[in-house]
Image (cartoon, grey):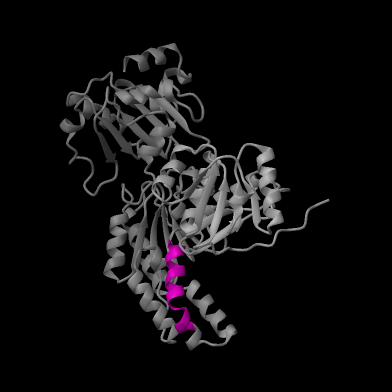
Amino acid sequence: MTPPPLFPLFASLAGRAVLVVGGGAVARRKVAALLPTGARVRVGATDLEPQLATWGAEGLIEAIRGEFDPAWLEGAWLVVAATDDAAVNSAVADAAGQRRIWANVVDDAELSSIHLPARVERGQVQIAISSGGAVPMLARHLREQLETQLDDSLGALAELLGRARSRIRARLPELPARRRFFDRVLQGPIPGLLRRGDRATAQRELIAALEHQQPAQRGSVVLVGAGPGDPGLLTLRALRVLNEADVILHDRLVSAEVLALARRDAEFIEVGKQVGGDHDATQARIHRLLVEHARAGKRVVRLKGGDSFIFGRGGEELEALHEHGIAFEVVPGITAAIACGAYAGIPLTHREHAQSVRFITGHTRDGDDALDWAALAQERQTIAFYMGVSGLERIRDQLVAHGRAASTPFAIIENGTRPEQRVVLGTLADLPELVRSHSVGAPALLVIGEVAALAASLHWFGSEPLTAGGAGCGSAAGEFARAA
C-alpha cells in the first residue's frame, strides 16, 4: 500500500532546542544544516567526530557524551537520529513519539515522523524536495537539476521584494492587482538587472513600476559564447540567457544541439559569414539587427561560436551597442583552442614542452603580413591558428624560414568537441599535403608545437588521430609522441 503524501512545512527553529543523536559524519551534516537556522543544537553521542568536537568547544553546539538517554529530549522541538545503530535509532524514535516530538531517523522513512528534504537555497528563497523517503536519490537528482536552473540573483530578488512588501501591500491592497503587479515585475527588466549586480537600478525600476510610472520597455543584448559545438560546454549562465531570449542572432557554426537548448518560441536569425563573402557588410547587418531588435524592447542574444572576445568581433559589436545607448552584458564561452585542444588530448601548455600559447587568426584587417613570424617561430611555445585550413603553405614556409624546425609536430582538429571530430597529426614539413590528403575542412583548428604530438597517446574523445596514409596512430606515431 502506498503511504499517504507528506504535508510540507518550513519550521522556524530559531532559539528552539533540537537534539541530534549521533557523533559521526552523518550527524555532522545534519548539524551543519541546522546551525544557520538559529536552532539551539544539542548533540548526544559516546564519541564526536573532530568537527562536532570543535563546534562543541566553540559553544556552537551543546555536546552530551554517553549512551542515548530519553532525558536528552527534555525541551526539544525536533530530534534527528543519525547513528549507525538501528536499535538506538528506534529507541530515539519511540521516545520522541511518546513525547509528541517530531523525529527524523536518517535513512528510515517508517520510523520518521518528519522528513528532512533535499533543498535548493537562494538567499531567502528555499525549494524543498521530498520523495517521502522512498527514493532519496531521486530527490537529490531533482535538486541538482534545479541548482543549475536557478541563479544566485534569485536571493537578491527576494530580498528586494521583501523590503518593499509593506509598500506594495499599501499601494495595491487587492490581491488580483498585486498578482498582476508581480507578474509584470518578474517578466520585466528587474531580474536581469540583479543578475548583472545593478541593485540600485533594480530598486529604481521597482519604485517606478509601483508608482505606475514605468519607463518604456527597453531591450538589451547579451553576447553569449556558445563554445565550439558540444552543448555540454555551455555555461549555466549561457543556458539561462538562451531560455529568456526573444531574439537569437547566431553564427552559422553554432551547433544545432546548442540551438535546441534555447527558448523554443524565440526568433532565430542566422547571421553567419560565408567564406569569400563580404564580412564587413555582414557585420554591419549584424550591428543593425542588434540595435533594431533591442530598440523594439526585445531581449536579444548574440550567440557566437567559441568565445565572443577571441576572434569573435565581440568588441566591435559592443562598441556599436554602446554608440546607440543599448544595454548589454557578456557571457564568456570556452574558446576553440582550449576546448578542441582538450578534446584532442593536447595540453596547450606543458612544462616540458611549452611555456606559452599564442592565438592567431587567419582573418585580420590587413592580412597576415603584420604577423611577427620570427616570434612565432620561437621554440617551447604553442601556436593555435583559428580558421586553420587556409594558408597552410604560407604558415609552414614562414615558420621554417624564421627558424622553426620542419620536424615540429602539428595537429589539426576538424569539428572539435563534436561527434564527428577528426584529428590529423604530422610534422610542419608535410602540413599542407597531409591536410589535403585527409580532405580536412572547416571548422578546423591548427595547433603547432611539441604538445601536438601528445594527442597520439592522450586522445580520449572520438576516433583515433590520423597520420600519413590515412591510418590511425600506430607505432610510429607512438614513437613520435614519446620523442616530443
Magenta stretch containing residue 77, yes or no? no
200 or 302: nearer the viewer:
200
Q: In this view, does 373 lie to the left or right of 151?
A: left
443 or 238: nearer the viewer:
238
Q: Can residue 242 be seen by looking at this rendering?
A: no
Q: In this view, does 368 lie to the left or right of 292?
A: left
Residue 226, placed above or below residue 192:
above
Locate residue 197, reporting x and y percent.
35, 64
Residue at image point 47% right, 21% down: 470
Q: Is residue 302 left or right of residue 449?
A: right
Q: In this view, does 142 lie to the left or right of 205?
A: right
Magenta stretch containing residue 158, yes or no? yes
Locate residue 427, reporting x and y percent.
32, 21
Magenta segment's dominant SS is helix
User: How many marks overall?
Assistant: 0
Highlighted magenta segment, given as a residue range: 153-168
Locate residue 302, reporting x and y percent.
41, 58
